[in-house]
Image: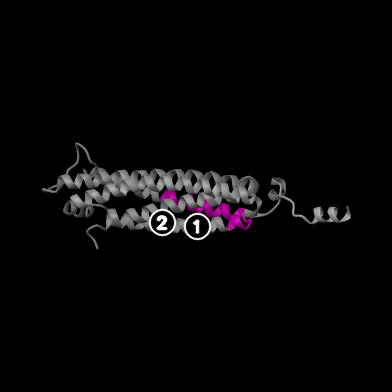
Amino acid sequence: MTTAIASAEARPRAETPAAAADKPGLAATPPLRRREMAFGMWVFLTTETLFFGVLFFAYAAMRFAHPAAFAAASRHTDVAMGTLNTAVLLTSSVTMALAVEAAEIGRARIAARLMTATLALGIVFLAIKGYAYHREYTEHLFPGAAFHFAGPLAGGAETFFWIYFVTTGFHALHLAIGVGVVGFMAWRLARGGLAAQSAASIVNAGLYWHFVDIVWIFLYPALYLVSRS
């Protein structure tokens, strides 16, 4: 009897959610729950990859069909603003990665500040892109009745700008969603710390943010550097 009791006491007990919540950072979320959250996020990102994959396939097919027109149309995009936005997004990836690391080790205040910086950079990106859209609209580069492109390549150029506005528009929408999510999490962190916003959820937000950044890394050369290599 004594041996059985001792064996039972020595056997590791399953960690309860309440006990896990007392731990700092990522350890506050039970391992099984972390795996479930990560799996759900990766499934979601896979569907998003397929969505953007269709858009990139359309771009590749149309560029193959209209190589000269795509090169000519790309020269009408603002490469300076595209490059600036690339730098802004890469910087936001750094701040988001640092925020995730801070959350994982239980530094809620630092994580909140870094996430605030991340969303601010996201807003800067959207502001620059909005200004670029305005310029392109006033230059009659928006596809439709008002589209104007001199020369025999106008048809292929309009196809380029259809793809340009659709792909960058969907990217901007995804980034705006990311800004909203990161901003909400930063607000909860600032008010209630990691008890209000778990580190595991911040890790998932970081995955989403990096995904959006990676999409732009592919869009930037495809749309802005076609004829500038």
Q: Is residue 186 visible?
A: no
- Residue that appears at 49% across and 52% down: 207
Give whichever of 48, 72 is nearer the camera.
48
Say whether residue 115 is magenta: yes
Q: Return the x and y of residue 168 as percentages of the image width and height.
A: 33, 47
Would residue 46 be found to the left or right of residue 14 on screen?
left
Label 2 sits on residue: 88
Would residue 60 be found to the left or right of residue 125 on screen?
left
Say whether residue 47 is magenta: no
In the rendered image, the quadrant that contains the C terminus is: bottom left
Q: Amino acid at mark 2?
A: Val
Judged from the image, the secondary structure of the residue bearing numbered disc 1 is helix
**Main secondary structure found in the magenta portion:** helix
Q: Is residue 196 visible?
A: yes
Q: Amino acid at mark 1?
A: Thr
Q: Return the x and y of residue 131 as percentages of the image width and height.
A: 33, 47
Q: Return the x and y of residue 82 as percentages of the image width and height.
A: 32, 55
Q: Return the x and y of residue 155 as percentages of the image width and height.
A: 16, 44
Q: Residue furthest left?
A: 152
Answer few, some or many: residues within 10 Å of disc 2's Cα (few below 14, many 20 plus, some between 14 and 19): many
